[in-house]
Amino acid sequence: MGGPEELIRGAVSYFDARLGGVPVLRKTLHYVFPDHWSFMLGEIALYCFVVLVGTGIYLTLFFDASYAHEVYRGSYAPLRGTEVTKAFGSTMQISYETKAGLLIRQAHHWAANLFLVAIVLHLLRIFFTGAFRRPRDVNAAVGVTMLALALLEGYAGYSLPDDLLSGMGLAIGYSVLLSVPVIGAWLGALVWGGAFPGGDEFVSRLYIAHVLLLPIAIALLVTIHLAIIVRQKHTQFPGRGKTERNVVGTRLWPAYALRSTSLLLAVVAVVFLLGGLVQINPIWLWGPYHTYAATNGAQPDWYLGWLIGGLRLMPPLEIHVFGYTLVPNPFFGGMLFPLVVFTLLYAWPAIERRITGDDARHELLDRPRDVAWRTALVAAFFTWVAVIFVAGSADQISVHFQIPYGQQVWFFRIAALAAPVLVYLVTRRVCAELRSRNSRPPRGAVVRRTPAGGFERIER
Amino acid sequence: MRRALALAALALAVAQPAAADSVSRGRALFVEGCSSCHGFDARGVAGQGPSLVGAGAAAADFYLSTGRMPLDAPGRQPLRDDPAYDRADIDALVAYVASLGPGPAIPDVDPARGDLAEGQRSFTANCAGCHQVVGRGGVVTGGFSPSLHEATARQIGEAVRVGPYLMPPFDEHRIDRHTLDSIARYLRYARHPDDRGGWGLFEIGPVPEGMVAWLLGGVLVLVVVRLLGERNE
Amino acid sequence: MRALGRWLVAALLLLIGRRRARPARPERPRYEAGGRDELLVLTLLAAVPAACVAFVVVYFTDASTQWLGLALGGAFALAAAAAGIAGKRLVSQKRHVEPRPELEHPEEQEEVLRELHEPGEGLTRRRLLLTAAGGAVAALLGALAIPALSLGPGAGGRLTRSPWRRGRRLVDEQGRPIAAATIEVGNFLTAFPEGADKEDFASPLVVVRIRPDELRLPAHRSNWAPDGILAFSKICTHAGCAVALFRYPLYRPRSPKPALVCPCHYSTFDVARGGHRIFGPADRALPQLPLAIDGEGNLVAAGDFSGRVGPSWWGVRKS
């Protein structure tokens, strides 16, 4: 019939003649994907990353990573005549003068936020279904590492424009780094190339970390993550015809390829819709950063809210010896807390192996209700982090609900300890109920109408 | 000439009692509504309310026109509310308080005279720490700093000069008249700032942005994967 | 309490435990080629270029971010819908079964291990060679890492350096000296050392004035606040934000006392007592700068800060 069929035939034979690739192509087309919807959460993150790289490349062509001063002369009137850095000024240029610049910039920022939403949802799915068990414990570690890198990458990214909000965030980050015992001051000076706020050398380092070093690291880990999945094949929920040694699902070609393409397009759609319709990080309202300036109600992006919560809830404890400070306060909420969380995330597969004594290979997932103790523990752990996360916006809660800040701090301190316990108990109960619903015999009695007109019960 | 003089004298005679009238009317209102905390002589009641001698017209007009006074109970933070008195009564009370002793007069604030960019810079430097960079209000330990979006230019000027409740006062050495006009102009702008990025999320910042990421973005992508994927039998 | 627990459990069950009675799913394929689904996908695909054209038109006309986003996002949404419907309705949904790979090869493991160790059999100093090789690699990596130290100067002096000296004049953000007489009780302003870098952590000051009779400074600072004018570092000792709130009550008896508050985590510093912390996570007091009034009536520093400026680090004095 000519046309597209001839083209494809030509392409396949070209490929085969040079790389001998037809068997690989065949295998790829036949590759079976278990297709539960929750298995697509990681893909959402992957596609967000693709969008981030694409929109990010565009932004690098306009952004000026420099702390050199200039006087703003753009079209946003309330900042005209204000002294700003070139980083801020170039971001203003992208937002106000460049056509579609604000769309791309906001799409980039929304994609970053969505990237972390997807990672967290995916992480929850992995933990609740026991997908981290052998042989996927190594891939779980890769995933947790990517979470850490994504957090760092997002922080670096929104700190680049040198606006008031993100500048305050950098000062706090600097303080947390400084608070590391023994080497903190040295670390701070190393990263900043001197004292805070640093000059051009700092912002250019931040820029290179954000556009080159961290994306390469994430891309590398994503590749390893996917390669491991391809090699091991994806897990699946138990069900009819599914065993520990097979994969039941949809082939890549045609159905899964189309569905995955649809997901990619949908993620791009969501990101551009948000990027055009919902404002994010309006730096022109915040203004430029100065070490001597601050605004009430400053917050980091959502995925760092848990760290702010840690800083807020930590009592004014500092460890001193003979009048010299050894462990400054920000260390506990800003460094120790995330270290504990990440250690637990990394160690959980090993901890579970210890508890259950189960070191076998698992390819079938658990339904969360079937492993109530793990589901409840994971839920409790995430509740602990979530309560601290909510505490991070205590100042906003104060303003909007008129609840005094000091009272909230105490409430959240107690809730951070009490809520996980409550959630653990409730989750166990819910799991038990859900399990028993499937296996309970029908309730009630079987009755029969008697000839006399009444009912009699048939004993079963 | 004599006719003009006579008319002038008549006008003066009419005006004086009118002014005195306002003060005495104000005093009557004061005794009725304010003296329980501020004392019959307006010299304050220990532990209840301050002396208003020297408080000035600016303070009186500010507190009354924003409905902060009368206060439900002493010790509570005075918050914006519907004014308890109409304009005429407020003017009378203001006249009375002003008559008690010299104090800050009602400032003449005109946003049109101010410079928007200077207002942004000045507001950020002096006010954003408490009131948030676009005047949405905020928290201070021991109280709340209110949103400034309902304040009139006059009320802004009054608050700046008086320093109500926990707010520090700013006299002309700190914020001169032109700067005050500029701040008022900036705050007028801040009521409806440039939200060219779309829905402004009340210009609060990353907290509502995070909510949108989860409740809009997250929900949308979850719906999509739910439609695309399969469910368990 | 138990009743509450039961209600909570019931609510959760209602949310997640509902399951409609569904007939057992027939074996796929379930699709019907042709018909409505094909038409739907065609329509969606046809609408995509229309939306893209809209995007281009908006780009070249008013380029409003909202319309651009709607057009482009809409185009992708239409394409996503087309691909999704095609993927679920137009093509075969047949289930396939594949075996999983056997991951472990115990016999081959043994062989591989043997082959790895084989070359070393003939060597006499095998362990020494291995140790030496390991040491060499470690040394190489260590050497490669050393240039990273050039990233930053030694921390040392940087953190304790301060531009403030006895006699250094205070200036405002425009560089003008500050006359003490212009500062009223309750005022608060930001000041800098004359001629210094304003962004340096040790530079910005917050200057406030309280009534002299309210001062409760420690004995050795009794002359640090002429006329009740106090100066403190503007950088919070908790996490480095600018201490930009000054709480000064109009009516003292029923209000909290004058204090400087940081807007980040609300560390609150008592100005009358020399910056002592009364609330919040900061541990060290806000460093106070001694003030004096020079011959022209302007504010000058009478020395350096009472303690280290900014957030704490290992070894800093608590002061």
Image: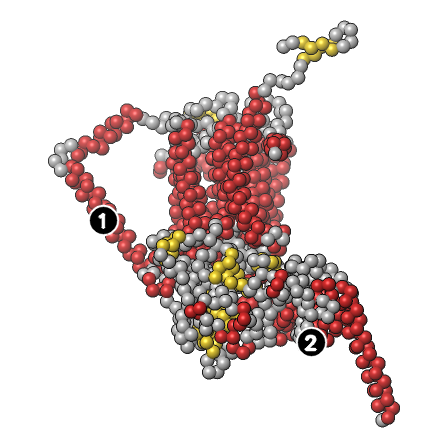
* Residue type marked 1: Ala
| Neighbourhood count class around disc 1 (C-alpha, 10 Å): few under 14, some 14–19, many 20 upward | few
Q: Is residue C31 visible?
A: yes
Mark 2 belongs to which subunit? B
A16 left or right, relative to C246: left
| Neighbourhood count class around disc 2 (C-alpha, 10 Å): few under 14, some 14–19, many 20 upward | some
Which residue is outermost to the left? Answer: C124
Give the Cα separation between the discs numbered 1 and 2: 82 Å
Rendering colour mode: secondary structure
Q: At x 24% / y 30%, what residue is drawn?
A: C113
Q: What percent of the width, then of the height, locates residue B14? A: 84, 81
SS for dot 1: helix
Mark 1 belongs to which subunit? C
Q: At x 59% / y 22%, what residue is drawn?
A: C24
Numbered circle sitting on residue B101? 2
Please name which of the two marks, 1 or 2, marks the residue nearer to the observer: 2
Which residue is outermost to the bottom? Answer: B1
Q: Which residue is mark 1?
A: C139
Seen in the picture, residue C159 relative to A221 is either above or below; the reply is below
* Residue type marked 2: Gly
SS for dot 2: loop
Q: What percent of the width, then of the height, locates residue A95? A: 54, 60
Q: Quadrant of the C terminus of chain A?
A: top right
Seen in the picture, residue A302 relative to C242 is either above or below; the reply is above
Q: At x 56% / y 58%, what residue is drawn?
A: B141
Quadrant location of residue C107? Answer: top left
Seen in the picture, residue C315 relative to C206 is either above or below; the reply is above
